[in-house]
Amino acid sequence: MATAPAATAATPPVAARPRSRVFTAVAAIVVLFLAASSAPSPLYVVYQQQWGFTAWVLTAVFAIYVVGLLGSLLVVGALSDHLGRRPVLAAAILLEIVALALFLVAGDVVALAAARLLQGVATGAAITTLGATLVDLEPAHARGRAGVVNSVAPTAGLALGALGCGALVEFGPAPTRFVYALLIAGMVLAAVVVVRMRETSPRRPGAIASLRPRVGIPARLRTDAVPVVPVMIASWALGGLYLSLGPSVTAGLFGLRNHLVGGVVVTLLCGTAAVAAFLLRSRPAPSLLAPASVLLGLGTLVSLAGVSTDLIAFSALGTLIAGVGFGAAALATFGTFARIAEPHERGALFAAAFVISYVAFSVPAVIAGIAGTAFGLRITAEVYAIAIIATAAVALALRLAAAGRSAR
């Protein structure tokens, strides 16, 4: 009787294939959540025209989203380590559907702000749990894949959401409605996936205690985790500028008022970051920290030259260079976190990573929105770019110093 060939690393056993399919489905849900979070970016200019609010109000709406997201990260970031991944994901998807439905019917800034707040809470609960779930489901024959997906999927989602929404606003029906209907349909499919998947993290006591707001990196992990923080701050601060004010800068400074172009601006940064993270996936995470810092600083400098001289080609080139740095930074950070955390630490560690990322993503962008109203978009963009260049330089200096100490 013939026997089946033994499974190899190249050909995973049949039992591993359903697990790999669930892994792929969870990765798609990460992309979907981040796409939903960036979809309003090309619409901000439309809302601004329809409802007549200032750049300060625009970034306040942006900040409300991040307040909800950070609050969610701080309160429920570690909850899935205790209740399991499925209940937390199911609740996050349900809340996201409610937020998208509110976007669908929004008729003023108050409704828009309420929708963004709920979306922030849902996204905060989802992204940490999804990140931990990917590590739980990582195939045995593909170690390191979870770190790659956690690096690629968020930036890919941000890019797809902004580009897709920009295209629908410019060419599709009901520009402030149709995109949310599509996203609701996607979330319903995500709910079906979560209901059907097996639980990947056993229940553990301490669920109520885990709701106490706190964030931190466990002491034993700090040696590996802390050195990646500066480059994380530089990259996400740049992302915050592009998602909050990027389309407005394009329209106000370069006169490009096509809504698809507003989505392309975000996609140039985030899409390039996703591609770069995928292409660099085989590189050890620590080796990417210095190149990421250099590329973030250089790209931002070239973009600054474009803004200062009204040369959009320079700004586009700089955005592409910075996008590669963004992708390398994401791979270095999330690759490190996926590698060093034990199963019971994953939810809390990813919560800490996302808190740092989204504070950097939001606080400078809100300050920029206020400054843009007071001093104008051009000078605001120039000062913001200089701050990012300085932060990237600090990240590079710290990395080189650490490398020098380890070499001795």
Image: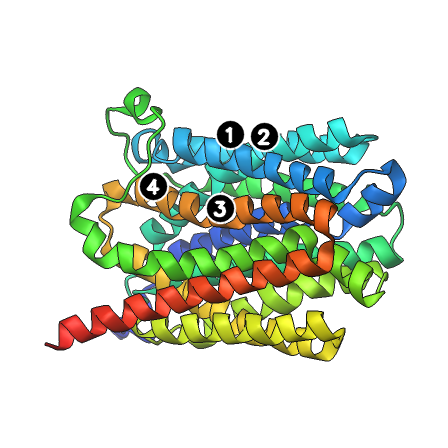
Q: Provide the secondary structure element on which disc 1 rests.
A: helix
Q: Looking at the image, which residue sits at the far left?
A: 408
| Residue type, mark 3 in image | Tyr
Residue named by callout 2: 95
Q: CA distance from mark 4 to mark 2?
A: 19 Å
Whole-percent x, y for residue 388 in the image: 50, 62
Left or right position of 302 against 387? right
Residue named by callout 4: 347
Q: CA distance from mark 3 to mark 1?
A: 21 Å
Q: CA distance from mark 4 to mark 3?
A: 16 Å
| Residue type, mark 1 in image | Ala
Asked whether residue 15 appears in the rendered view, the answer is: no
Q: Quadrant of the C terminus?
A: bottom left
Whole-percent x, y for residue 329 in the image: 42, 65
Q: CA distance from mark 1 to mark 4?
A: 16 Å
Q: At x 28% / y 22%, what residue is drawn?
A: 209
Is 402 in front, or is 153?
402
